[in-house]
């Protein structure tokens, strides 16, 4: 069926469950929200990620899908979607839902993609399989940080330092322990940034990261602020947007910084950086897993040593701060996709 934009009045995007994975789908939503400003727009997301869309006036409904829920709960949930009679359904998690709710247009059950394609572009390919969009949206329609959230972050920073200034955002956590760089490495890098460049450090993450960040902040002293466990996802977006650099592991803050076009240096271990790494012109990474037995052979029971192989000197050799701006060198140093 030939795509007719004039017949698209209700749109549903079926996103994913984990926060980082959902952030990777935001460019798809930005295109649709920009191209169909009058359409009623809904999103399916996991329980943890639903707050990304809280208060966004452009998104009418967020339908929470818990992949662990029983089939008896899923059946009426799908029936509720079907009753809304969507014109366009873009399914980014490869489910049977589009077939079951009978939209006018839907993504195919199987969409071709090249092996090793970054997940952001894989999602964009799925969109193009049903809707021949022009270019990516330069605006971030899918995230809407409220004035209250902006004021909350501004007050936290002002209370800590008494003035507005750029800072380095550091996210020392990751859902998988094998993806976390060493606390000592973060301490050494942050200490250098404070002493050499007079930078301030803001630690971000969830409640589980708070204790580790507190111990690092105690070593580093007064030029640090520990916001782990103190922000919502949208407040984290505000912190990220104001950062001069995001120094991160493979985690949701990495994807958030990539989405917001903030300079990123991501420290990678066992993950496939070409599929899940930082993206955009400002996305860079370090990875030293060539000699990691667990990375080279997934069946090997040896503990991953690839993150520990990254030294603080490796990180500090990747960039400099010149007149307040982060400069990566060489210029093409491990640029993201």
Image (tube, helix red, strand yellow):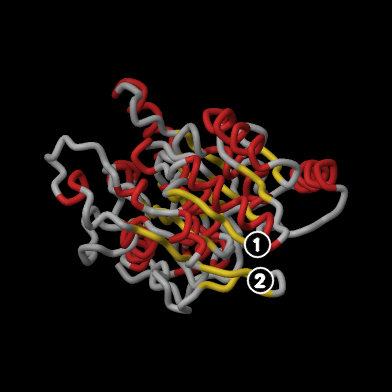
Place of residue 208 in the rendered image (x, y in percent of width and height, measured from the top left): 52, 28
Q: Residues within 10 Å of mark 2 (few under 14, many from 20)?
A: few
For label 1, the SS is: loop
Q: Residues within 10 Å of mark 1 (few under 14, many from 20)?
A: many
What residue does disc 1 label?
A: 244
Place of residue 249 in the rendered image (x, y in percent of width and height, measured from the top left): 45, 49
Q: Residue at x 67, y 38 (%)?
A: 226
Place of residue 109 in the rendered image (x, y in percent of width and height, measured from the top left): 23, 53
The answer to whether 98 appears left or right of 11 in the picture is left
The answer to whether 156 appears left or right of 278 in the picture is right
In the rendered image, the residue lying farthest to the right is: 162
- Quadrant holding the N terminus: bottom left
- The label number, if any, that marks residue 214 in the structure image: none
Q: Residue at x 59, y 44 (%)?
A: 53
Q: CA distance from mark 1 to mark 2?
A: 7 Å
Q: Quadrant of residue 224?
A: top right
What residue does disc 2 label?
A: 325
User: Is 114 located above or below residue 300 in the figure?
Assistant: below
Closer-to-camera residue (125/131)? 125
**Do the CB atoms of the residues marked 1 and 2 lie less than 8 Å apart?**
yes
Q: Quadrant of residue 121?
A: bottom left
Q: Residue at x 48, y 79 (%)?
A: 331
Closer-to-camera residue (145/7)? 145
User: Is 235 located above or below residue 212 in the figure?
Assistant: below
1 or 2: tag closer to the N-terminus: 1
Closer-to-camera residue (54/58)? 54
- Quadrant holding the C terminus: bottom left
For label 2, the SS is: strand
Place of residue 167 in the rendered image (x, y in percent of width and height, measured from the top left): 69, 56
Q: Residue at x 57, y 66 (%)?
A: 34
């Amino acid at each position: 069926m030939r795509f007719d934009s004039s017949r698209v009045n209700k749109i549903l995007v079926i996103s994913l469950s984990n926060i980082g994975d959902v952030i990777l789908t935001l460019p798809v939503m930005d295109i649709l929200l920009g191209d169909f400003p009058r359409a009623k727009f809904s999103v399916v997301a996991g329980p943890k990620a639903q707050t990304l869309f809280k208060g966004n006036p452009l998104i009418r409904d967020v339908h929470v899908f818990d992949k662990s829920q029983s089939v008896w709960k899923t059946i009426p949930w799908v029936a509720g979607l079907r009753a809304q009679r969507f014109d366009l359904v873009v399914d980014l998690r490869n489910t049977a839902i589009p077939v079951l709710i009978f939209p006018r247009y839907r993504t195919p059950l199987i969409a071709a993609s090249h092996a090793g394609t970054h997940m952001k572009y894989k999602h964009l390919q799925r969109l193009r399989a049903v809707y021949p969009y022009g270019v990516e949206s330069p605006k971030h329609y899918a995230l809407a940080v409220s004035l209250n959230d902006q004021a909350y972050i501004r007050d936290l920073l002002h209370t800590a330092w008494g003035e507005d200034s750029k800072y380095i955002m550091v996210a020392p956590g990751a859902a998988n322990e094998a993806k976390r760089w060493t606390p000592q490495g973060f301490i050494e890098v942050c200490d250098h940034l404070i002493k050499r460049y007079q930078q301030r450090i803001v630690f971000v993450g969830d409640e589980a990261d708070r204790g580790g960040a507190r111990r690092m902040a105690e070593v580093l002293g007064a030029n640090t602020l520990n916001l782990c466990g103190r922000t919502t996802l949208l407040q984290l977006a505000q912190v990220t947007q104001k950062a001069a650099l995001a120094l991160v592991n493979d985690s949701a803050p990495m994807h958030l910084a990539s989405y917001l076009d903030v300079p990123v240096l991501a420290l990678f271990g066992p993950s496939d950086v070409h599929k899940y790494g930082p993206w955009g012109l400002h996305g860079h990474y370090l990875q030293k897993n060539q000699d990691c037995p667990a990375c080279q052979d997934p069946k090997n029971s040896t503990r991953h040593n690839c993150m520990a192989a990254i030294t603080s000197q490796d990180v500090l050799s990747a960039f400099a701060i010149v007149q307040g701006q982060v400069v990566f060198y060489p210029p093409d140093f491990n640029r993201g996709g």
